[in-house]
Amino acid sequence: MATEIGPAQKIGIIGLGRMGTAIAKNILKSGFKVTVFNRSESKTTPLIDLGAIKARTPKEVALNSDIVVSSLRDNNAVLEVITGKDGILSGF
């Protein structure tokens, strides 16, 4: 049995390089609520202009999302986003 995704689903995107930004833009175009985080805050601006919500930390993304997608450069960045002081898991 297929699972339906409701229109109110909230998606979080962490990491706004070329791939993360493209993913976020496509999800926004599909009508989902999108929360974004990037270490360089300036990369969030074009997405905020398209309707995304800016998070101050990965933890904030996780707390405000049903699904979190990350597009990060390397293992250290992944570990920091997940287990760091304000990482995804710090809110649980």
Image: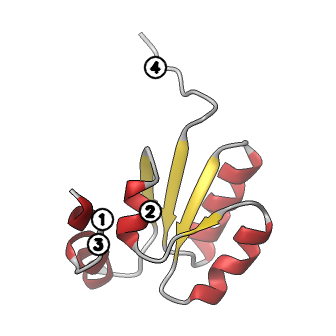
Q: On the picture, is 68 further left or further right than 10? A: left
Q: Which element carries disc 1, helix, strand or loop? A: helix
Residue type beneath disc 2: Val
Q: Quadrant of residue 42?
A: bottom right
Q: Which element carries disc 2, helix, strand or loop? A: helix
Residue at 32% x, 82% y is: 77
Expressed as whole percent of the image width and height from the top left, the position of residue 83 reads 20, 73
Residue type beneath disc 1: Ile
Q: Which element carries disc 4, helix, strand or loop? A: loop
Q: CA distance from mark 4 to mark 1?
A: 25 Å
- The residue wearing badge 3 is 87
Q: On the picture, is 70 further left or further right than 35? A: left
Q: On the picture, is 65 further left or further right than 35? A: left
- The residue wearing badge 1 is 88
Contact? badges 4 and 2 (CB < 8 Å): no
Q: Quadrant of residue 74?
A: bottom left
Q: Residues within 10 Å of mark 2 (few under 14, many from 20)?
A: many
Q: Which element carries disc 3, helix, strand or loop? A: loop
